[in-house]
Image (spheres, rainbow, N blue to C red):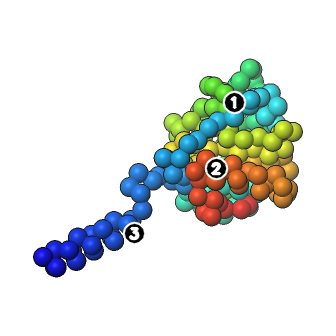
């Protein structure tokens, strides 16, 4: 019987090291996640810089830029540069707002966004910093209107990711 107990204890310890079986990407899927109900697509339109994101197997490219151009109510063309497996790549896509703070992307630059709804988790009152993520946790990013990270707004953005279940210690600064 002692050998059976040791074997059982060893299996339990091994299972504990593996972590939660349902964890995908960079957030705990059991954590509550919410999109920004008061998101204003017209104010979101314009140029954004990627200040931080989760690597997802991409190369380090430094700060990249995205342009969200309104082409109608709740619809955008989205162009810019993203980090791919071998460095920076250009992309050209479309985005449609499907609900409060919820966006569907067509032809996304990053594979982890293919078919995944992107949620606006937070935007500051003046639309200077935004946090986007997916419920699956395969994608998360902090965008800013300028390439410099403003300390107070950047800290607030990190807190939003943390609140929504993201593992912010894996966040890559650009």
Identify the mark nearer the N-term, 3 or 2: 3
Dot 1 falls on a residue whose secondary structure is: loop
x and y, in percent, of residue 99 in the image: 63, 25
* Picture residue at 84% right of the left edge, 44% below the top: 128
**Mark 3 neighbour class, 10 Å CA radius: few under 14, some 14 to 19, many 20 or more:** few
* Picture residue at 27% right of the left edge, 69% below the top: 11
**Mark 1 neighbour class, 10 Å CA radius: few under 14, some 14 to 19, many 20 or more:** few
Residue tagged 2: 163
Quadrant the C terminus occupies: bottom right
CB contact under 8 Å: marks 2 and 1: no
Which of the 4 quarters of the picture holds residue 83? Answer: bottom right
Dot 3 falls on a residue whose secondary structure is: helix
Q: In the displayed image of the protein, which residue is found farthest to the left?
A: 1
* Picture residue at 82% right of the left edge, 52% below the top: 153
* Picture residue at 56% right of the left edge, 42% below the top: 32
User: Quick check: 106 left or right of 68?
Assistant: left
Dot 2 falls on a residue whose secondary structure is: helix
The CA span between labels 2 and 1 is 16 Å
The CA span between labels 1 and 3 is 38 Å
Q: In the displayed image of the protein, which residue is found farthest to the front?
A: 1
x and y, in percent, of residue 159 in the image: 70, 53
Residue tagged 1: 37
Question: Is residue 158 depicted above or below 14 in this figure?
Answer: above
Residue tagged 3: 17
x and y, in percent, of residue 167 in the image: 58, 58
Identify the mark nearer the N-term, 2 or 1: 1
The CA span between labels 3 and 2 is 24 Å
Which of the 4 quarters of the picture holds residue 169? Answer: bottom right
Question: Is residue 76 depicted above or below 154 in this figure?
Answer: above
Q: Nearer the viewer, residue 65 or 18?
A: 18
Question: Is residue 40 depicted above or below 3 in this figure?
Answer: above
**Mark 2 neighbour class, 10 Å CA radius: few under 14, some 14 to 19, many 20 or more:** some
């Amino acid at each position: 019987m002692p050998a059976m107990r040791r074997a059982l204890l060893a299996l339990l310890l091994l299972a504990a090291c593996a972590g939660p079986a349902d964890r995908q990407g960079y957030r705990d899927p059991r954590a509550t996640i919410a999109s920004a109900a008061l998101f204003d697509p017209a104010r979101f339109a314009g140029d954004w810089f990627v200040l931080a994101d989760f690597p997802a197997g991409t190369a380090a490219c430094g700060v990249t830029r995205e342009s969200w151009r309104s082409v109608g109510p709740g619809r955008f063309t989205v162009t810019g540069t993203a980090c791919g497996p071998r460095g920076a790549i250009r992309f050209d896509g479309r985005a449609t707002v499907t609900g409060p703070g919820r966006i569907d992307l067509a032809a996304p630059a990053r594979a982890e966004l293919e078919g995944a709804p992107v949620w606006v988790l937070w935007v500051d009152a003046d639309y200077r910093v935004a946090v986007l993520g997916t419920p699956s946790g395969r994608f998360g990013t902090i965008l800013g209107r300028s390439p410099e990270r403003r300390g107070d707004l950047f800290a607030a953005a990190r807190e939003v990711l943390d609140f929504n279940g993201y593992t912010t210690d894996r966040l890559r600064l650009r």
